[in-house]
Image: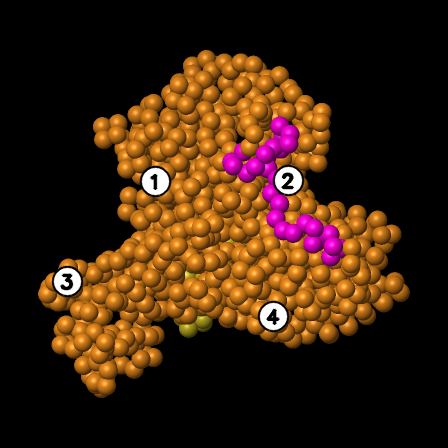
Chain colours: A yellow, B orange
Amino acid sequence: MSKLHVQLTVNGREIEALAEPRMLLIHFLREQLNLTGPHIGCDTSHCGACTVDLDGKSVKSCTMFVAQADGAEIRTIEGMAQPDGTLHVLQEMFREYHGLQCGFCTPGMITRAYRLLQENPNPSDEEIRFGISGNLCRCTGYQNIVVAIRAAADQLNAAKEAAE
Amino acid sequence: MNEATPSAEVRTQKLQGLGTARKRVEDVRFTQGKGNYVDDMKLPGMLFGEFVRSPYAHARVKSIDTSAALAVPGVKAVLTAEDLKPLNLHWMPTLAGDVQAVLADEKVLFQFQEVAFVVAEDRYIASDAAQLVEVEYEELPVLVDPFKAMDPDAVILREDIKDQEEVGGHGPRRHPNHVFTWDVGDKANVEAAFDAADVTVEEFISYQRVHPCPLETCGCVASMDAINGKLTVWGTFQAPHAVRTVASLISNIPEHKIRIVSPDIGGGFGNKVGVYPGYVCSIVASIVLGVPVKWIESRMENLSSTAFARDYHMTGELAATKDGRITGLRCHVIANQGAFDACADPTQYPAGFFNIVTGSYDIPVAYLSVDGVYTNKAPGGVAYRCSFRVTEASYLIERMIDVLARKLEIDPAELRIRNFIKKEQFPYQSALGWEYDSGDYHTAMDKALQTVDYPALRAEQAANREAFANGETRSLMGVGVAFFTEIVGAGPIKNCDILGLGMFDSCEIRIHPTGSAIARLGTISQGQGHATTFAQILATEIGLPADNITVEEGDTDTAPYGLGTYGSRSTPVAGAATAMAGRKIRAKAQMIAAYLLEVHDDDLEWDVDRFVVKGAPERAKTMAEIAFAAYNSVPPGMEPGLEAVSYYDPPNMTYPYGAYVCVADIDVDTGVTDIRRFYALDDCGTRINPMIIDGQVHGGLTEALGIALGQEIDYDEIGNIKGGSLLDYFLPTAVETPVWETDFTEVPSPHHPIGAKGVGESPNVGGVSAISNAVNDAFAHFGLTHTQMPHDHWRVWKTAERLGLTG
Ligand code: FES
Ligand code: FES
């Protein structure tokens, strides 16, 4: 199968690659770029384990071809911490409030929560639950995930206020 | 103690031992996407395997033509049963002592059964080529209804064993589709109890076929190193050592030449206990092709071919006096085992621990019989976050108590209390043969009923019923009470083994000279946080901070032999092994300390993290100091070093229990059930890490919600699976999931070294009953005694319609 030339930015890094037109973005990230944080949990776009941030939106990376992501700017869980290794508040709060168990949903969940807080910096618990309803977790029952996202929102808001 | 020594509280705090909500060490990598799950592995030259699966539930395989698939560039091999036959690997043993086809041998017995295995350079090519394998089938009559399996004219499914007298040593078979009959209890006395009873009730209660569906599916990477003759398999194994032994037995590769590794596992819940055709095919392909081979299930393959749970169809009967004393229990079960009996039950228990069916109640006589049958459904029969059929048993008794309460017009909570095993009766011998270790059921139930203000709930319900009757509301309120007793921690070798392997577990500890340690266990975490909690147990036992203790599991080359993690057995069994190994360390440390302090061993006492001389607390040696001394100044005649290993064979199971209350509102016009409140009180004995316990309870309750309100792996009459993808199989999202209220009492297990009982599975066991009881309770005043799960919108609406309540 002839390959397409794609160019995209992933976690701040410029990527140029050749890929089959039918290659899914999730397989490209995991197998060609070795970014194995986003996972595969289904084949029907239900689980959200593969969630990445693409041009300012949460995207299930199993639902698009890498060819469709040509020119896009993508952030995965691997790009969530700062370059010096400082963790994102969400990463810290997930640990602090036991928002994960087996960890399989966690990269997608944190990536989704990151975008949710960009869209709505001060969500109610109900809005958080609705906002992450495209991401399934089989271990935690979501309760501590909601607590962790709420705590992260509070910290981010407090930091913003302090800066203003 | 001199002034420089911090207080015992400060030092205890520093250890982060038993009882502290220690943050999980695993999370640092998981939150950064640095977990190492099997599909993350990449080895040089690695190929991908993909199955060709049967579209039919029952058919003869007439021919398989692999030529078109082999012609696809990048395809390296296509395996069929014919290729496996010379190696004698076309069939494999199951954990239940049956055999299962690795690749269909002459016929297929369930839809999506494995027929051929394509190996190619990447997963896209493998899946292209799998489409091109041409299989010619001749359809056969299909049997899906377990009640028809033993009809005289039923089609024979397992021709391979049709003349075999028994399967897995479980006694004589009456029919070619019969797997086993298991009966326990005192039939004659139960009959007498029923004859003499004031009241009896009977109900047919089905527990539908469901699937554990962890977020990560099953998979493996097999790599045969031809030069050294060593096979390594990384995979989703809840019991790596058992897999190694089975792999050795079936492949004839010596066991020391096999290394099984469980990397991070994305949830198990029973799905990853079994041995699957994908593992065997990957191993064979790697041996044949000389390169590593990866196989990863898709979600549809996962739901349709590996490890269903339940599918128990139960008839329960209770006999009682008119004031509500239960005098006898009788139960018959038809167990649908699917095409092969692949249940992961201990050998002596073909229906698992279903004989815990007397529950939390002092029932003098009971009789139980279970008939296992084959059908054209997928094999499995795993314990989906429960201990070997306990969930089914607990569901039956908890529903039956409600049915009896209705008949006697006694409140269901009150009826439970009247029949509870009393605190002073422990250790309690149940009518069906178990010895319950400890409990205080009355205290737990009182606390639960008080916390939820049970009388107020019933008063509110009475008002709701009146309002409904007057046409003021279309919503019905249901209150579900459940009180479960689990039986976990399999188990004593005297009655628990799998394929002859005793179900002990193990821990090996090495203390390093600078006062840090590594502990290796025979178990494997799938999200339970073993690396965190086992270090806590050890911190308390040996007085080194949990942060200085590495816990390693899942690599059979380094870990001591153990039977793995399922049935909530890690804490009761491996947790005990950890404590016992820690105590061996401490005993040796005491001798070293005595030598260093020039006193007799008996003159020392343990104080959090050190030995001190009795009456002279300023003279002490900390564990860290002793660790160093162990490598340079041990008493004459003593071997240097500080290491210990313990293989723990538990004297008994542990019996966690709990009181759950669920309040639900049901819209009769839509069938939508809204869980308004759910209160869960758990008693799991000594609590190792309250944060992790709460998390386990939240997760288990959410699974229970899924099962009670929607999950079902259903089949049509010709054996097509109807719940085989996440389109159809219900996994609750954050929106459907309520906020769970958790609570606890703490009655330690008397026979466990630290008194812990295990908790991971309790919420699934108790949660399903509480939710189902609430749904049934909402309609109880219209005469409904029982309606089958799952209580999805459609079924609930049908119930309302049947009772004449809709539009
Ligand atoms: S893998 Fe499940 S939504 Fe993408
Ligand atoms: S932590 Fe296991 S799926 Fe969410």
Q: Which mark is residue B204?
A: none
Callout 2: SS: strand
User: Foreground residue, A6 or B163?
Assistant: B163
* Residue at point 61%, 67% (across, down): B421
State the separation of the CA atoms marked 2 and 1: 35 Å
Q: Which mark is residue B371?
A: 2
Q: Are marks 3 and 1 in contact (CB under 8 Å)?
A: no
Q: Earlier in the sequence, mark 4 or mark 3?
A: 4
Residue B737 location (% of width, % of height): 61, 57
Q: Which residue is mark 1?
A: B260
- From this viewpoint, is residue B467 visible? yes
Determine which quarter of the picture holds residue B586.
bottom left
Q: Earlier in the sequence, mark 1 or mark 4?
A: 1
Determine which quarter of the picture holds residue B394.
bottom right
Graded by Cα atoms within 10 Å as few (under 14), some (14 to 19) or many (20 or more), the crowding at tag 1 reads many
* Residue at point 71%, 27% (across, down): B152
Confirm whether the magenta stretch covers residue B39.
no
Q: Which residue is mark 4?
A: B422
Confirm whether the magenta stretch covers residue B173.
yes
Callout 3: SS: loop
Q: Which residue is mark 3?
A: B638
